[in-house]
Amino acid sequence: MSNRSEVLLALVGFMLDKMMGYHFYLVYDQMIDDLSDPIIRQMQNYGDVAVFPYDTDFTALQQMIRGFYHTGNLRNILVICSSEKTLQLFRMITRRNLQTPSVHWFVILEENIAKDIASVIKEGTQVSMAVGQSTAYDFFISHVNKNDEIVFTEIGSWKWSPTGSPSRKTSPTFSQPLYRPMREMYRNFGGRVMKSAVIDNTPFFKVNVLPDGTVMPDSGIDSKVLETLGKVLNFTYQLVITEDGQWGGEMANGSFTGMIGKVQSGKAHFAINEITITGPRERVVDFTLPYFMESTAMVSRAPAEKNRAFAVFSPFTAEVWLMLCITTLLMGPLITGATRIRGTYFQYDQSQIHSLSDFEFNIYRSLVIQGNFLFPSGWCQRSLFLMWFFFCFLIYALYAGTLTAVLTIPSFEKPIDSLTDLLVAMDKDDFKANVVRGTSNEFIFSLATGGIYKEIWDRFDFDDGYVYSWDEGVAKVLTGKYVYMNAYLGALIRAKRRGLHNFYFGRNTFYPQSYSIACSNGSPYKVLFDSLLIKMTSAGLVQKWTQDEVDKVRSGDTGGSNGPGAITLVHLQASFFIVVIGYTVAVVALIGEKIKSAHIDSHLRKNSVKVNGYF
């Protein structure tokens, strides 16, 4: 074996000793064709090994990096290729977004192309590099400096000597470890300035834009989360506000709008502002563990109180009223008939028998609890009146109790409590659904292939259904037949500002949403964010910050009901209608009687003339 081969094998052995984990991959070209088998056997002593001869397609390597197998553990990739092919390999890693903190790259080169590699890789591609020829190699590791630049720093050297025992042939001198875990590397950002994409969105992240265009945090749940992360990890942050004010929707070319688009394009390191985890977004960003969960609410205008013009009739159904009328009308003839039969067969004075109109009038008086002026002498009539009085008592008690409840407890139109109610309201009452454009609440409907989501989307009015902010959505509800669908907390706070009594929140929510921080693909600090977010939620900080936002909103409620109020003219409209109807009937009857009387007088005068003519 030549000295070069022996040096390379010794160097690989040294690097394998510094690697972590049990999964090793070798990428090589013709430079080491004669040494590939010895290197592979050497790597097999440390764990599982996969070999990838250099291929410009890189399909097999890409499948391995993106595969789910072993993604939870560190994987080590040793690259021994020419400088040109090594640079081409890292260009592919960046172009295909294959950077990941679960892979650490170990590169052996004959010439120093550290600056070239640093210019093509993204944060998340961790590289340890050995550069040298003959028997001496210098070692470099990549990291991101305070100026947000990827650079390589020399950490030591390694030399091989042809003499001495195998253990003494190498002499490494290092100031830092060849491999540092992500948790250790990013435990302290060293005052680095991180860029966070945001939109102005109370109660999660309220911002102020200064005259010079600088975006400053004002308040909000996510503002507190970001502030805490910065203090613990020692970084400051610069807010990057999105021009379109959107969270992030996928466009036809695969790019995203809004905050997700800022992270995807590299204009921001991460985005935090009530960002929902969705499948399409996960393809272009890495989400942290969720730190806030809520569901989507349906907000509609408070149901209007039902018309009380005929409230006095509401205690009974139409069938009951009809039966009362029939029963009342029949009781008069029934008692009159019984009285006349008794008078005929028992030889009573017919002058003592009351007329049908007397009986009918007193039957009605009893029904409305006005007493009875008749004093029947027979037990037959007394029995009929006794049962009728008891019947009237029951009817009056039921009517009075029910009417009291109807007049004192408001009755409202049927509210929209579920998606099924919304679908019916859209079909029968011309209600329209509203969603904020470019949010997950739009996507669950627009991407649905079946079920009630698709049925609602099929009826969606694209001209009048979109709104572009939460404030616009809540305000639009008060202008007509609209149902605004968005996350509960933000809708609740905006409704409180406009008077919560003006709105109705459906009893059933849907589409539970998890909010997290959207980091760039392969973000190496995501694991640190995950750990701190768990601590914040477990300590109740996120819940406290949420309650703080709710408490500081001044409610606009000034017209809510404090319980049953006094009975007004609205409640008694029907009573006055009855009086007016009575007056009208009386006037008509008076006119009728006048006409009839005039007709009779005229007829009598004619007859009188004829009689006088004969005499």
Image (tube, helix red, strand yellow):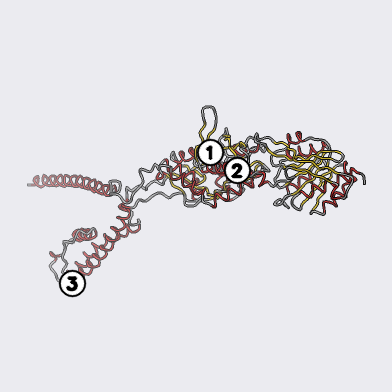
Q: Measured from the top left, where is residue 493 in percent x and y?
A: 46, 43
Whole-percent x, y for residue 449 in the image: 62, 48
Q: In the displayed structure, would residue 216 be above or below residue 77?
A: above
Are the residues tagged 2 and 1 within 8 Å (C-beta)? Answer: no
Q: Is residue 490 above or below residue 404?
A: above
Read off the residue under disc 2.
Answer: 233
Q: Residue furthest front?
A: 164
Q: For this rendering, which residue is in front, 139 or 458?
A: 139
Provide the residue designation for mark 1.
Answer: 466
| Left or right side of 543 for 236 | right
Residue type, label 1: Tyr
Using the image, tell me which numbered label, if any, was put on residue 345.
3
Q: CA distance from mark 2 to mark 3?
A: 111 Å
Label 1 or label 3, whichever comes before in sequence order: 3
Front-most of residues 274 and 232: 232
**In terms of sequence position, does the residue under pointer 2 or pointer 3 come before the other?**
2
Q: Position of residue 555 (x, y in %)?
A: 40, 43
For the residue labelled by badge 3, is the local secondary structure a helix, a strand or a loop?
helix
Q: Are marks 1 and 3 in contact (CB under 8 Å)?
A: no
Foreground pick, 354 / 159: 159
Total labels: the figure holds 3
Mark 2 surroundings within 10 Å by alpha-carbon count, few (fewer than 14), some (14 through 19), many (20 or more): some
Q: Nearer the viewer, mark 2 or mark 3?
A: 2
Image quarter of residue 501 = top left
